[in-house]
Image (tube, rainbow, N blue to C red):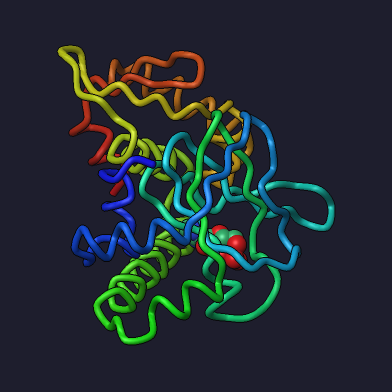
Amino acid sequence: MDNDVLRQAPLFSSLDDEAATALRTSMTETGLRRGEVLFHEGDAGDRLYIVIEGKVKLGRSSADGRENLLAILGPGQMFGELSLFDPGPRSATVTAVTDSNFASLTHDDLLKWLDGRPMVANSLLGQLASRLRKANDVVADLVFSDVPGRVAKALIDLADRFGRTADDGVHVHHDLTQEELAQLVGASRETVNKALADFASRGWVRLEPRSVVIHDIERITRRAR
Ligand code: CMP
């Protein structure tokens, strides 16, 4: 297990080395191949996961089979805690976008671990609060922003987490298909492709399969506002 990656997770960020090692011993490692499902929306769940390597998508589907992506998570990010703090079924389906590894902890072990460790509970609350803030932004964007604005915002978010800066711009290997990008933005594939093609024709981005190079991060950031 990669300690540096675990350190980014809110469960670990406030622990000293000794405590982090103790917590790791109660964790189990799991792996998924690209396309495999870890659990489905509606399942009962008793574990929280931290992504060690790879990327997952968190999806929900409508009664008529349409899909929406709540988030793409990568190394150091955590999921699977909602069904503990707000007891109920899993609120999303988690599918590996690339081959991925996770460290997981049962909800019972997590509760024992939090007992008497207010700083760890504090970090977890911080993560939940920031997720709520982000979810509010997504709702506001669905109401107030046009599709190109939402596409630009999604690119910035993916660049922040998965981007690598090179001479020609920020290379973002998001590993998503065009359909998945559209599900993340909450628009049709055609509309999202049109927005991306427009950004490309202006020279702001270069499109590649499952990745994008952002040449002009300033213009994309401005378009995201
Ligand atoms: P749980 O409901 O147990 O299983 C699905 C998980 O997806 C959920 O816990 C959260 O950890 C995570 N999740 C749900 N909604 C979001 C969101 N909007 N952003 C990031 N993660 C989420």
Picture layout, residue 25 above or below residue 110: above
Picture layout, residue 184 above or below residue 194: below
Q: Horizontally, is 97 left or right of 13 in the view?
A: right
Query: Which residue is located at x 32 percent, y 40 percent?
Result: 161
Residue 96 sits in quarter: top right
Q: How many marks?
A: 0
In the orientation shown, which residue stands out farthest toward the right?
64
In the orientation shown, which residue stands out farthest toward the bottom?
116
Picture layout, residue 130 above or below residue 141: below
Picture layout, residue 126 above or below residue 80: below
Q: Position of residue 209 (x, y in %)?
A: 50, 15
Q: Horizontally, is 16 left or right of 38 in the view?
A: left
Query: Which residue is located at x 32 percent, y 86 percent?
Result: 116
Q: Position of residue 153 (x, y in %)?
A: 36, 44
Q: Where is residue 108 in the image (x, y as percent from the top left)?
A: 55, 76
Q: Horizontally, is 38 left or right of 168 in the view?
A: right
- Residue in front for this viewpoint, 139 or 191: 139
Query: Which residue is located at x 27 percent, y 65 percent?
Result: 19
- Residue in front for this viewpoint, 160 or 120: 120
Query: Which residue is located at x 54 percent, y 41 percent?
Result: 56
Which image quarter holds the N terminus? top left
Is residue 143 among the parts visible in the rendering?
no
Query: Ligand 1 falls in which quarter?
Result: bottom right
Residue 130 sits in quarter: bottom left
Q: Position of residue 125 (x, y in %)?
A: 35, 76
- Residue in front for this viewpoint, 77 or 102: 102
